[in-house]
Amino acid sequence: MKIIITSDVHGHLDRLHHLALVHPDADYYLDAGDSEGTETSVYPFLSVEGNNDRLQRFPKTRVIDAHDHKIYMTHSHEFYPSQRDDGLIKKAQRLGCDLVIYGHSHVPDVRTIHGVTLINPGSLYYNRDRSPLTYVILTIDESNVKIQHVPYR
Ligand SMILES: [Mn+2]
């Protein structure tokens, strides 16, 4: 199973459409919010509501089944930065999810804490740590979860 993950596109919807063209074989296209688009204009991506999404109310969270894994996706702006990890992990555990996709920080991240893997793809608009624009290719097969941060362009 192949899943393309983006976040914080902030209106550059052409970049989402470009990634969908580059990866036509993905099973899911997931966006962690602040697309500033609409459900139609971000298609084929499924997005969640970020603090800058004003055109349309996206769902605040999504839970996606992926093989033997379960993904919890949220933009995460409701958490104070210092409490974000804890909050995301507790919510994921309550929902029975072992993978979390979050955005908002504009910093690429992947860490596993208490059996829950937190994934932030970074932003397709700008990354606060000045790293290149990034997205994630998540590959899930029988026994393996692979998380690759990929530079955009
Ligand atoms: Mn945000």
Image (spheres, rainbow, N blue to C red):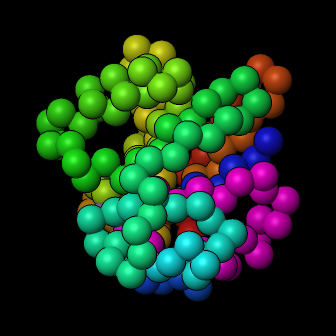
- Residues in magenta? 15-35
Rendering quarter of residue 89 = top left
- Image location (x, y in percent) of residue 88: 34, 33
Task: Check the image and report above or below for 137 versus 24.
Answer: above
Q: Is residue 103 left or right of residue 69?
A: left
Q: Quadrant of ligand 1?
A: bottom left
- Image location (x, y in percent) of residue 102: 41, 47
Front-lying residue, 130 or 88: 88
Q: Does any portion of residue 66 appear in the rendered image?
A: yes
Task: Check the image and report above or below for 23 versus 78.
Answer: below
Instruction: Name the quadrant of the C terminus.
Output: bottom right
- Image location (x, y in percent) of residue 110: 45, 38
In the image, residue 29 lies in the stretch drawn in magenta: yes
In the image, residue 46 lies in the stretch drawn in magenta: no
Q: Does any portion of residue 153 appear in the rendered image?
A: no
Residue sitting at x 61%, y 30%: 70
Residue sitting at x 43%, y 27%: 92
Q: Is residue 126 left or right of residue 116?
A: left
